Image (cartoon, rainbow, N blue to C red):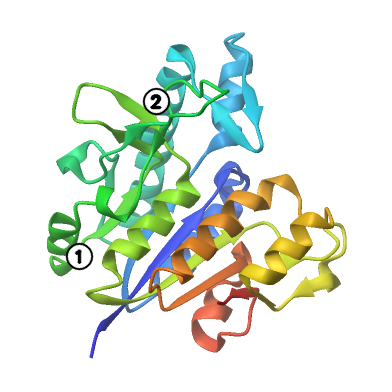
Amino acid sequence: MKQKIYIIKIGGALIDDERLLDQFLDQFSDIKEKKILVHGGGKLATTLADKLGIEQKMINGRRITDKETLDIVTMVYAGGINKKIVEKLQQKKCNAIGFSGADGNLIKAKKREHPEIDFGFVGDINKKSVNRKLLSKLIKLDLIPVFSAITHDKKGNLFNTNADTIASVMAQALSEKYEVELLYCFDKEGVLEDVNDPESLIKTVSEEEFTVLKEEGKLHKGILPKLENALGAIKNNVDKVFLIKETELKNHIENHHAGTEICL
């Protein structure tokens, strides 16, 4: 029987709120099973870029990363945010260790290629990008990996990589060895038919239903990368995938009825 592991992704809205982040990490540290935390931090990076007068460009919810922006996101994601989370988890007696993809060659990426758009220093990855052997050893040592959204190409280049994608491919890479549950935690109750109505929660979303919701324009652009990556995970042998509200982590772990479940 496979050992259970949770791969949990959090984003900028939670990271920006000191009180909510602390409450979330209390719930995260209480999880008894093996676990990995993946974080973004886009809002803080955007705020710093604004202060420095560096224009930020987004296309379909994805950041264009020039050299100046890469420096900012590396400082913010792999530096400030990552170490703040690790320190808070250590305070809660949770033996966390922070990583970028370059550390231990844990996530090797390649520069995104697009026929029309130059995304700059943006890296694309798949499940083969993950150094599963080393990651498994870290997990066996009862360390709690905390991953920032920075990867590398082993040729001297760092890349900004979507944290939703990192969580998805990591779940896929570990699915052969572990019973993986992937949780996308964000500031909504799950997938909502009406983004302004918390009561419009959709309890399950399949690929077919996702296509219909997208065509009908019912999905906010910010949730598209989450759903695309969630579907990619469930189609590649990840046992369970949910989108849940950040404050519902403990409730979900104990009762499994929070948020939206992604299914085939």
Q: Nearer the viewer, residue 243 or 216?
A: 216
Residue 234 in the image: x percent, y percent?
Answer: 47, 71
Instruction: Give the numbered dot on residue 75.
Output: 2
Point 65% across, 73% down: residue: 260
Marks 2 and 1, Cα distance to the nearest angstrom? 26 Å
Q: Secondary structure at mark 1?
A: helix
Q: Nearer the viewer, residue 54 or 94?
A: 54
Q: Amino acid at mark 2?
A: Met
Rate crowding at label 2 as few (under 14), some (14 to 19) or many (20 or more) other CA atoms within 10 Å. some
Point 22% across, 46% down: residue: 106
Does 120 sit left or right of 205 as displayed?
left
Q: Secondary structure at mark 2?
A: helix
Where does the C terminus fall, quadrant-wise?
Answer: bottom right
- Please identify the residue farthest to the top as the structure is shown: 53
Instruction: Give the numbered dot on residue 189.
Output: none
Point 57% across, 10% down: residue: 52
**Vertical comparison of 180 with 114: above or below:** below
Does 23 sit left or right of 216 as displayed?
left
Which residue is disc 1 drawn over? 139
Q: Amino acid at mark 1?
A: Ile
Does 189 sit left or right of 232 as displayed?
right
Q: Which of the two discs, 2 and 1, labels the residue nearer the N terminus?
A: 2
Q: Nearer the viewer, residue 15 or 62?
A: 62
Residue 41 in the image: x percent, y percent?
Answer: 52, 39
Point 60% across, 59% down: residue: 227
Q: In the picture, residue 160 is in which quadrant?
A: top left
Q: In the picture, residue 154 is in which quadrant?
A: top left
**Vertical comparison of 203 with 26: above or below:** below
